[in-house]
Image (cartoon, grey):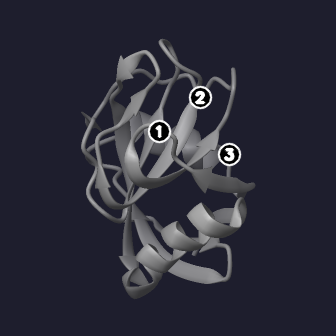
Amino acid sequence: MTKVLVEAGPFRFEGKLEEELAPKTCAAFKAAMPFVSQVVHVRWSGEGVWVPLGERDFGVGYENHTSYPAPGHMILYPGGISETELLLAYSGVHFACKMGQLAGNHFLTLTGGLENLYALGTKTLWEGAQDLKISLA
């Protein structure tokens, strides 16, 4: 099991890559680590934060995909109908874009620091973009 550290805004979370369920997505994301960006609040999907990635190609298709990630689950949408993106659910999410429902690959699960997850979401909603860094633990 590969452990990761997710630093988002002022919060730190421990997590694990879902290598058995999404091996190609995990391998592609590990190659991109440390991953540094910002999260913004979702527009269509409910209570989550996301990282718009434009035309970035991780070279993966669908695996372990869902439209309803649970709080603490991070998904990678590999692109197609909408742009490539990451989404981290902090409460109820129905993953979508202006064109309709999407599905993303659940590849990372937060395992520690979850007591701060909702605070990250509301901070992002009310204060704007928050710095994000995902690295191997």
Residue 29, visible in the rendered structure: yes
Inter-mark Cα distance, 3 to 1: 13 Å
Q: Which residue is mark 2?
A: 58
Instruction: Relative to 52, say whether 61 is above or below.
Output: above
Q: Which residue is mark 1?
A: 76
Residue type, numbered disc 2: Phe
The residue lying at 72 percent from left, 55 percent from top is 38
The residue lying at 56 percent from left, 22 percent from top is 59
Q: Disc number at residue 32? A: 3
* Nearer the camera: disc 3 or disc 1: 1
Inter-mark Cα distance, 2 to 3: 9 Å
User: Residue 69: where, in percent of width, then height?
Assistant: 28, 49
Q: Is residue 98 left or right of residue 94?
A: right
The residue lying at 59 percent from left, 73 percent from top is 123
The residue lying at 51 percent from left, 40 percent from top is 43
User: Residue 54: where, in percent of width, then height?
Assistant: 69, 26
Q: Are marks 2 and 3 in contact (CB under 8 Å)?
A: yes
Q: Is residue 135 left or right of residue 103?
A: right
Instruction: Relative to 117, say whether 68 is above or below.
Output: above
Query: Judging from the image, what secondary structure is the residue with disc 1 in?
Result: strand
Q: Are marks 1 and 2 in contact (CB under 8 Å)?
A: yes
Mark 2 or mark 3, which has the lower sequence index?
3
Residue type, numbered disc 1: Leu
Residue 4, visible in the rendered structure: no
Query: Judging from the image, what secondary structure is the residue with disc 3 in?
Result: loop
